[in-house]
Image (cartoon, rainbow, N blue to C red):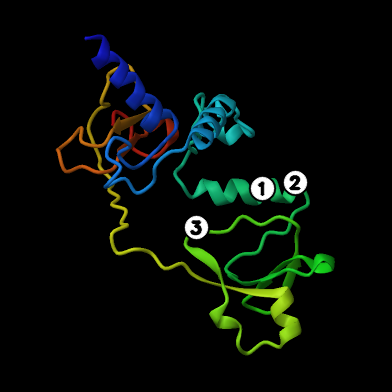
Amino acid sequence: MLMVKLLLVCRIILYGIAMLDHDQDNKETCGHVLKTKEGIDRLALYITSIGRSLIVLFSNALGALMYPIYGQGELPQAFCRRAAVKGCIYVLRMPVTSLLLDKASEGVRLASGQEIFSQKLVLDPCATVGLESLSPLTDQQKETIRVLVPKEMSSKEKIARGICIIRGSVRADISNALVLYPPKSLFPEQLTAVRVLQLGNGLAVCPPDM
């Protein structure tokens, strides 16, 4: 019984707090084996994220995860509002095509040709810095410009998403919840964790009594 409880706690920490995806008990099929340093960093990130609601829009998020009112469309809207308050530049419908690496003018170049300078950049995980697209550039440009290209994804790496409408909560006393199914908890061939985010009508994402 004690071993069962310890295993349960271990799975809660690995997949519910450290938010791992792959089965850590099977090294042959595990797409990412957690190292000790990374595990400590993930736990620290979770702990320091508890209760850190920066703006009124996310005041409902009492745990380590933030979820917006009125649906996911509020995320870019909230960022736009905060960017305006902090004096940032917010560009709509204009993708980034390349990085500017010159120390005197670090930043990005947009599809329109406009250059925006910044010392920090958050890159979409589906993009990477490419080298094969630099052939039209001169040697001097190649030292200061890197073109962004789509990242090649393995055919085995897929993400399945779904939206379900239910008449009631999975628990009567909770309207918002994150339900976690660790690897192999649903069926023996389940190699990755499955997460279900339940949001209630208090967040204005569904009608009352749902």
Residue identifier under label 3: 125
Question: Does dot 1 land on a helix, a strand or a loop?
Answer: helix
Q: Residue at x 51, y 28 (%)?
A: 43
Q: Is residue 200 in view? A: no
Q: Residue 159: where, in percent of width, then height? A: 32, 53
Q: Residue 112: where, in percent of width, then height? A: 65, 79
| Nearer-the-camera pick, 141 or 206 | 141
Residue identifier under label 2: 85
Estimate the spatial distance between the alpha carbons at disc 3 and disc 1, rounded to whole Å: 24 Å
Amino acid at pointer 2: Val
Say if mark 2 contacts mark 1, CB within 8 Å.
yes
Q: Residue furthest front?
A: 28
| Nearer-the-camera pick, 167 or 31 | 31
Q: Is residue 184 left or right of residue 92?
A: left
Q: Is residue 118 above or below residue 177?
A: below
Residue 129, quarter of the rendered image: bottom right
Question: Does dot 3 land on a helix, a strand or a loop?
Answer: loop
| Nearer-the-camera pick, 23 or 72 | 23
Residue identifier under label 1: 81
Earlier in the chain: of badge 3 and badge 1, it is 1
Question: Does dot 2 land on a helix, a strand or a loop?
Answer: helix
Mark 2 residue crowding within 10 angstroms, few (<14) / some (14–19) / many (20+)? few
Amino acid at pointer 3: Pro
Q: Residue 8: where, in percent of width, then height? A: 29, 20
